Image (tube, rainbow, N blue to C red):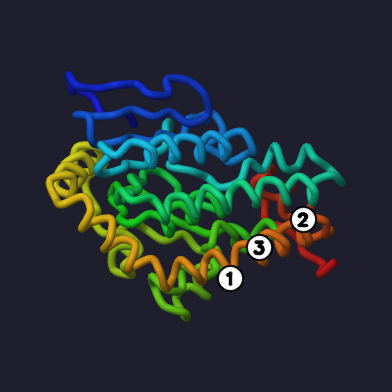
Amino acid sequence: MKISDSNNIEQLVAEGPVLLDLYQGKIAHIRLNRPAASNGMNIELLKALHDVVMLCHGDPQVRVVLLSGEGKNFCAGGDVLDFAARGEALPNYLRQVTSYLAIAVASLMRLNAPVIAVVHGFAAGGGGLGLVCSSDLVVAAESAKIMSGATRAGMAPDAGASVTLARIVGFRRAMDILLTNRVVSAQEALALGLVNRVVPDDHLMEAAMAFAQELAAGAPKALAATKRLLWNGIGLAVEAALPEEARTVSELSGTADSREGLAAVIERRSPKFTGN
């Protein structure tokens, strides 16, 4: 999902689970780079995501940040294969994962530059849905799909989605999306206000770059101040909710239903929950 046909690209991070390019000296492009795992989140990716966001934060020339995923999907959430391999150690591992996820999400919300999520394929789980909700603006491909998936795996929402989603689409709609795990199409997401623009698949990055250039032409201090003002109320609520989300996800990961949910996702079957 890399932007092409530009003669003014600087690769700031050229390898690893998260890549960072700089276009025209002012538009940063963060690319999740675990395509074989649908950009599923593990500790290494989350650490790298926070590091590249801090690079953007430390560069006063960065006016706008694009956030996309390499491969077929934007982000499929947590890396379920990695999680399942942890066995009984999963609750302790998820305490670390959710801590790094909380830091990464908060850093995106508090970044001075506006963040545009560029969504294709699936944006699912705490990772995909959480990043969509913690970005300032969202451009989606026509074929993009958004879902929670947390309770399907015997888990609960994280990445601040327990707060941000309800603020964006409303309480009842958020309950529906989070409890049923139904797939939300790009067009429905647009109608719900979850995304800002829906464009043809083959024009996604072109449209995202045009949006970024439009914002980059604005007054950077005014844009940063406006972003801060809009996030202040919701951002404080998100940051207060993140520790409780992390504790809840960690506790649930030790249950029999969570193990069954992860197995069902990996085996692509319907889970059989027992309440244990």
The answer to the question of whether label 2 and label 1 lie on touching residues, with beta carbons closer than 8 A, is no
Circle 3 residues within 10 Å: few <14, some 14–19, many ≥20: some
Question: Which percent across, then down, holds residue 75?
Answer: 48, 43
> In front here: 148 or 104?
104
Element type at mark 2: loop
Q: Label for residue 243?
A: 3
Tell which of 42 and 267 is nearer to you. Answer: 42
Considering the numbered disc 3 on the image, is that residue within a helix, a strand or a loop? helix
Q: Which mark is residue 253?
A: 2
Where, quadrant-wise, is the C terminus in this rendering? bottom right
| Alpha carbons under labels 2 and 3: distance apart | 15 Å
Q: Tell me what residue is drawn at x 59 percent, y 68 percent.
A: 241
Instruction: Identify which amino acid the numbered label 1 is placed on.
Output: Leu
Counting residues from the start of the chain, the first of labels 2 and 3 encountered is: 3
Q: Is 28 placed left or right of 258 in the picture?
A: left
What residue is pinned by disc 1?
Answer: 179
